[in-house]
Image (cartoon, helix red, strand yellow):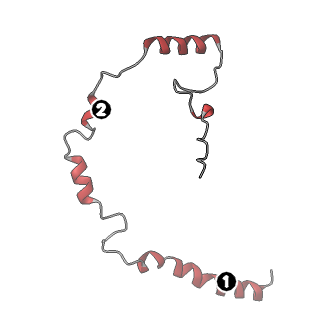
């Protein structure tokens, strides 16, 4: 690269690099620093006694033991069954017939 071409390139790139540092300053914010502003939310979570919903403490989870046993057996024997549910699932869904006028 010739010295004249380098000078032209440097003269064009240098102001862009210098102005890029001002982009954070030009954003209009009401905070002293960019990372500020969450003090209220941070204090509220810090002083919260139990952040988990009360339903999460329920250990009585209904389940079907026979269905779970069949699932474990399928897993153990490496047999795959097609997805579906007791009602037929979406694979067995048939749209209703159009009503005649």
Q: In this view, does 57 lie above or below 19?
A: above
Residue 75 image offset from top left, x and y in percent: 59, 15
Q: 97 or 47, which is in the foreground?
A: 97
* Image quarter hosting the N terminus: bottom right
Provide the residue designation for mark 1.
10
Q: In this view, does 26 lie above or below 91?
A: below
Q: Mark 2, residues whose alpha carbon is within 10 Å: few (<14), some, or many (≥20)? A: few
Q: Is residue 59 left or right of residue 80?
A: left
Provide the residue designation for mark 2.
56
Q: Is residue 52 above or below residue 87?
A: below
Q: 5 or 65, which is in the foreground?
A: 65
Residue at 65% across / 15% down in the picture?
Answer: 79
Residue 6 image offset from top left, x and y in percent: 73, 83
**Mark 1: which secondary structure?**
helix
Residue 25 image offset from top left, x and y in percent: 41, 78
Q: Mark 1, residues whose alpha carbon is within 10 Å: few (<14), some, or many (≥20)? A: few
**Mark 2: which secondary structure?**
helix
Q: In this view, does 27 lie above or below 98?
A: below
Tag 1 or tag 2, which sits nearer the N-term?
A: 1
């Amino acid at each position: 690269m010739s010295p004249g071409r380098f000078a032209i390139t440097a003269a064009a790139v240098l102001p862009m690099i210098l102005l890029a540092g001002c982009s954070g300053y030009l954003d209009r914010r009401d905070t002293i620093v960019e990372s500020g502003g969450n003090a209220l939310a941070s204090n509220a979570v810090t002083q919260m006694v139990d952040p988990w919903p009360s339903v999460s403490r329920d250990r009585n989870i209904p389940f079907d033991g026979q269905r779970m046993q069949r699932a474990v057996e399928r897993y153990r024997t490496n047999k795959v069954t097609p997805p579906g549910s007791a009602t037929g699932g979406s694979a067995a869904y048939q749209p209703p017939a159009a009503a005649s006028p």
